[in-house]
Amino acid sequence: MSCHKSYITTPIYYVNDVAHIGHAYTTIIADTLARYARLIGQDTFFLTGTDEHGQKIEEAAKKRGKDTQAYADEISAKFRELWDEFDISYDKFIRTTDADHMKGVQKAFSVMYDRGDIYKDTYSGHYCISCETFFPQTQLVDGEFCPDCGKQTSIVEEESYFFRLSKYQDRLLEWYRDNPECILPKSKRNEVIRFVEGGLNDLSITRTSFDWGVKLPERFNDPKHVMYVWLDALMNYVTALGYGTDEAKMDFWPARVHLIGKDILRFHAIYWPAFLMSLDLPLPKHIGAHGWWTRNGEKMSKSKGNVVNPKEVADAYGLENFRYFMLREVPFGGDGDFSQRALIDRINSDLGNDLGNLLNRLIGMSSKYFEGRVECDLVEKYYKTELDELQVSLDKLEPYIFELQLHRYLEELWRPLTIANRAIDKYQPWTMIKEGKTEETMALNGLIATILAKVSLMLHAVMPKTTTVIANALGFEITPESFNKIIRNGEILEPFVTQKREPLFPRIEEQLLEEKSIEESKEEPKKENKPKEEKEADNIALIGIEQFFEVSLKIGTIVEAQEVKKSKKLLLLQVDIGEDRPRQVVAGIKEWYSADELVGTQVCVVANLKPAKLMGMKSEGMLLAAKDSDGLCLIRPEKPKAVGTPIS
Ligand code: MSP
């Protein structure tokens, strides 16, 4: 480990909504790294917080009829409370409305200006409020929709200050080239390089269309401008250390790792290093971009009502089990699908069978044969092969953690448990004891205790409380000192006496949460006020037959089909349902059907839906389909039927 200071950050979360599983994921990864860094004796600073300025927040407050600052206070406090309940070991919780932060952002603006990196001009462009980003016409979908989130953009013409991003293009490329691990996983670095090689435009870094933001420093005498939220937000990573005010903590800079989701990689891997270059500050060591959590393969969103609430899950299944699951289940950088089944399997199998049972076996055998006593001094004499094997696994572990390969870390950490469980089956202590091999049996228990001790130390950052219980059962405490002794110096455990205890991971037989209850977001408007689609997603209500007949379902034949360019999901179909002209239907089925194979086939069409616009195209109906984990299939009549035949 080359560096002795570890500064670890999460993104700062927007206060337009409460935390969901994605926020919990980033925060839990960061917390794990911070705990690990502390345990190995590094001087660690772990930062999280909330991002509170910008038009999106202003609008969210307005929608709820609240004062913007009061609204930001309320949601920011909810994030903080959740992290406290989750025992997140942050050292500072920053808010972009903190006075010190705002001073630091103003200082940065001045420094960049004095460097010649900021100039004033007029900007006319397409702006996406949701992403708080301008996009050139060429990047828009169908000339008007945001390429990132698909929402409608609006044309904004403003006087603006610009940051000379283009000036930093070559230096950025050099940085990516010279630091192969600056962006993790490495595959993501290539995406960034390609983007930057495509050319960088200067960046508009102030807005005049709203005023919920950091004002420019007074010397500019330009009160109608506020700073662009991303300049404001990214600066949190250094203002939290006192940049521009009390710089005492700046020796933690540069960050060891900024943890983020893949959707905000461009801001962190391009804008942020360019800002730092302009400020003459060192660049972060790593930017780690994780993937997305989905639900039944779909992106989570409020309108779909499928957002997983992390607190519900942690309350039902145990916070630490949830932490283990999230880190073990998905390779860092990849997307992961949340399901209770997968969580239960991890708890019963990895935690219950492999880890929990091993401790039970040790307690059982030591109380049966040695009145609970366990001694480790003869382990090396009898079980050298197993100890060597154990060391091979342990040696592989540390690099994984700071390469952010936490799933591999945990996978490798489970090998020692297999070594222990295998040794019991192989040497059969119940036979050894009968044969009078008392020393060998005690040494075997010592081997199991040694393995459990090392695993609990290495697992501590992921499951702090559980591993503390295991360590107590083995007669030691988890501290940087014990880590040093047992892991680094290979010292053996002091003799100890085991006590009977409740199982650590009681088996879970069935799902503990109703599917819908994990998804309920506490911030939603009351059910009565919800749009119809959301109401329906919440529960299956009983309806009368008359209500069913309100839906007009008809047999249709697809007469034309084509792909919607720039869309991964949509096909544009013309469906004959026996009217004077075919209906145009925009269907999200491209992942499962090609345009060609659909032409001439029959489908079931909802014929009396209000027309809707999807990516700028009118859609005059909907096709019935069924989707499960294997994918989607269209519902079709069993035999060909005349077009327009009603379905009932
Ligand atoms: N405020 C900005 C970050 C500024 S950092 C200087 C922001 N905030 S956010 O609240 O919208 O998102 C914060 C993080 O949550 C992002 O890293 C994002 O990737 C992550 N996630 C949001 N939804 C997610 C999932 N469904 N799954 C995993 N993480 C996701 O962006």
Image (tube, rainbow, N blue to C red):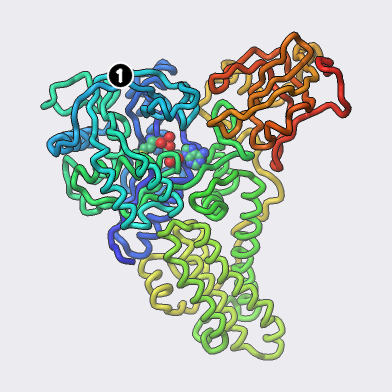
Q: At x 31% / y 62%, what residue is drawn? A: 42
Q: In which quarter of the image is ligand 1?
A: top left
Q: Which residue position holds label 1?
A: 210
Residue 116 vs residue 341, the one in the foreground: 116
SS of the residue at dot 1?
Answer: loop
Closest to the observer, 399 or 91: 399
**Where does the C terminus fall, quadrant-wise?**
top right
| View extreme (right): residue | 639
Residue 157, quarter of picture: top left
Q: Is residue 238 left or right of residue 572?
A: left
In the picture, measured across the screen, residue 248 lies left or right of residue 547, that is left
Residue 251 percent coordinates (x, y) = 21, 54
Instruction: Identify the residue at horizontal 42%, vertical 73% (top origin).
Output: 487
Q: Whole-percent x and y of residue 3? A: 29, 63
Residue 468 placement (x, y as % from top left) = 47, 61
Q: Is residue 435 left or right of residue 441?
A: right
Question: Residue at position x 63%, y 44% from top?
Answer: 339
Three-letter amino acid code at the position of disc 1: Phe
Q: How many marks?
A: 1
Pick the residue in front: 342 or 74.
Answer: 342
Mark 1 crowd level (few <14, some 14–19, many ≥20, 10 Å Cα): few
Q: Can residue 3 be seen here?
A: yes
Figure check: 386 above or below 291: below
Tell me where residue 541 sits by quadrant.
Answer: top right
Residue 67 against residue 34 in the figure, above or below: above
Quarter of the picture containing the N terminus is bottom left
**Rendering quarter of residue 572:** top right
The percent coordinates of residue 385 (x first, y second) are 56, 84
